[in-house]
Amino acid sequence: MKLNVNDEVVWPIVKFLITRLCADLSHNDNAPRALLREGKADQKTIDRAVREYLLHCNTAPRLRALTNIGYAFDVARLGASRPVCEELVREVIRKGMISSAQSVVAQLLDRELNAVEVKALVDAYVTRVGTRSAADETVLLALAKRTLAPEEVANVDATIADFVREFERASPM
């Protein structure tokens, strides 16, 4: 008998595996995704699984949350609905995953980041506590130049410059 992950009886097992994985990364990280893939999950079940991963992102420490977003992305690629993919993109941006944001948007939504998303990425970057990356700053400015009007690009440039000055002022030498 073939396993049907779309069955309401099987969903609690998938949810349990996701919950265990999100709580303790030493568990088999491929189990929920394999169940969904091999069980030929329908879009509703895939959406539920992506949302379950995202739910755990809100309560997890940063590194674990980023890992959970990666799992959510892997599941979303199995066929999540556009609204759920948009939720995932918002979470990627909220977490300030600059290097991932472009590829997530391209692969799941077949488009580029829009102006609102670029501004949100800049905001997420400058509010991140204790970290700075010249590479991220370069990517953000390039995204701004590609996406925003010239006066908005100047605002992004100024925001990042203010952040750099404040970061260097506050950093012990």
Image (cartoon, grey):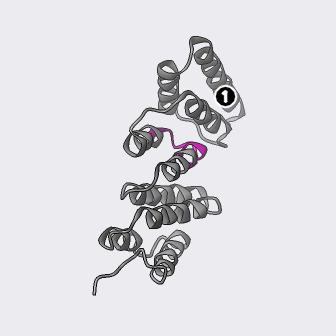
- Position of 144 with respect to 35 (left or right) is right
The residue at the point 55 percent across, 20 percent down is: 148
Quarter containing the N terminus: bottom left
Height in image: 35 above or below 63? below
Determine the residue positioned at 64% across, 41% down.
128
Q: Is residue 151 above or below residue 97?
A: above
- Is residue 60 found left or right of 28 in the rendered image? right
Q: Residue furthest top?
A: 150
For the residue labelled by badge 1, is the local secondary structure a helix, a strand or a loop?
Answer: helix
Q: Position of residue 129 (x, y in %)?
A: 67, 43
Q: Quadrant of residue 121?
A: top right
User: Magenta stretch: residue 92 in it?
Assistant: yes
Q: Residue 55: horizontal and vertical position, in percent?
A: 60, 62
Image quadrant of residue 70?
bottom left
Tell me the amino acid under the disc marked 1: Phe
Q: Count the marks: how many?
A: 1
Side of 120 where 97 appears, left or right:
left
The structure residue drawn at horizontal position 48% and vertical position 33%, both measured from the top left corner, is 113
Where is 18 relative to 157, above or below?
below
Extreme residue toward the bottom, this view: 1
Q: What secondary structure do most residues of the magenta stretch adopt?
A: helix
Range covered by the magenta-colored residues: 91-99
Instruction: Point out the image quarter for the C terminus.
Output: top right
Crowd tier of the residue under label 1, counting other residues whose Cα lies within 10 Å: few below 14, some 14–19, many 20 or above: some
165 or 141, nearer to the observer: 141
Is 36 covered by the magenta stretch? no
Q: Where does residue 83 sit, x and y in percent of width and height?
A: 52, 49
Per the image, the residue denoted by label 1 is 163
Residue 23's x, y, as percent?
56, 72
> Which residue occupies the foreground of this view, 51 or 122?
51
